Image (cartoon, rainbow, N blue to C red):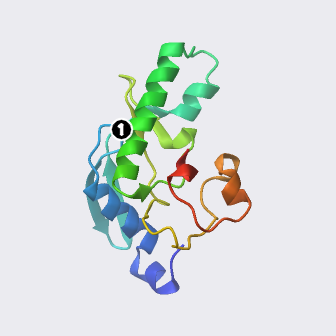
Amino acid sequence: IGSRQEAQDGINRTALREIKLLQELNHKNLIGLLDVFGHMSNVSLVFDFMDTDLEVIIKDNTIILTTANIKAYTLQTLQGLEYLHLNWILHRDLKPNNLLVNSAGVLKIGDFGLAKLFGSPNRINTHQVVTRWYRAPELLFGAKQYSTCIDM
């Protein structure tokens, strides 16, 4: 949520931060930002096409996840996270519906609206990140200093 002036200008800091981060990232397991364009007070982002997300797959009783599927999704998630963390970025909202999957079984991490650069151990952050059901225990207890462990 941005300021009133940002609302009048049509784009807030969160959207700008997401666009900037996505333009700088390039990894097979991160959603690709293909284009950004504006019209009047709207900004549109064009991403790689992904057929579904992991939450839909998990909840679909007609889909049987094999051990191989689970290992592949886990590996791809960890490879994407490793790339983010090596580039000093916390995703801060990792959950099944932000893990996008295409028809070939390729998983890409999406939704970088809460993503943030990190580095200083003394930096104060908000604990109001990550959807509550997926929030790390230290965030539930109000920690304001954290690093990559909150993405696990």
x then y, percent, for residue 117? 41, 64
The N terminus - image quarter: bottom right
x then y, percent, for residue 11? 40, 73
Tell me which corner region of the image, top left, top right, bottom left or bottom right, holds residue 119.
Answer: bottom left
Vertical comparison of 112 with 62: above or below: below
x then y, percent, for residue 145? 58, 66
Which residue is outermost to the right? 141
Give the SS element for disc 1. Answer: loop
- Please indicate, yes or no, whether residue 12 appears anywhere in the rendered image: no
Which residue is outermost to the bottom? 5
Q: Residue at x 44, y 23 (%)?
A: 72
Dot 1, crowdedness within 10 Å: few (<14), some or many (≥20)?
many
Vertical comparison of 71 with 137: above or below: above
The C terminus - image quarter: top right
x then y, percent, for residue 52? 47, 33
Q: Residue at x 48, y 15 (%)?
A: 68
**80 lies left or right of 148:** left
The residue closer to the viewer here, 101 or 126, is 126
**124 lies left or right of 108:** right
Vertical comparison of 118 with 31: above or below: below
Vertical comparison of 53 with 129: above or below: above
- Type of amino acid under label 1: Asn
For label 1, the residue is 29
Tell me which corner region of the image, top left, top right, bottom left or bottom right, holds residue 63.
Answer: top right
Q: Residue at x 57, y 14 (%)?
A: 64
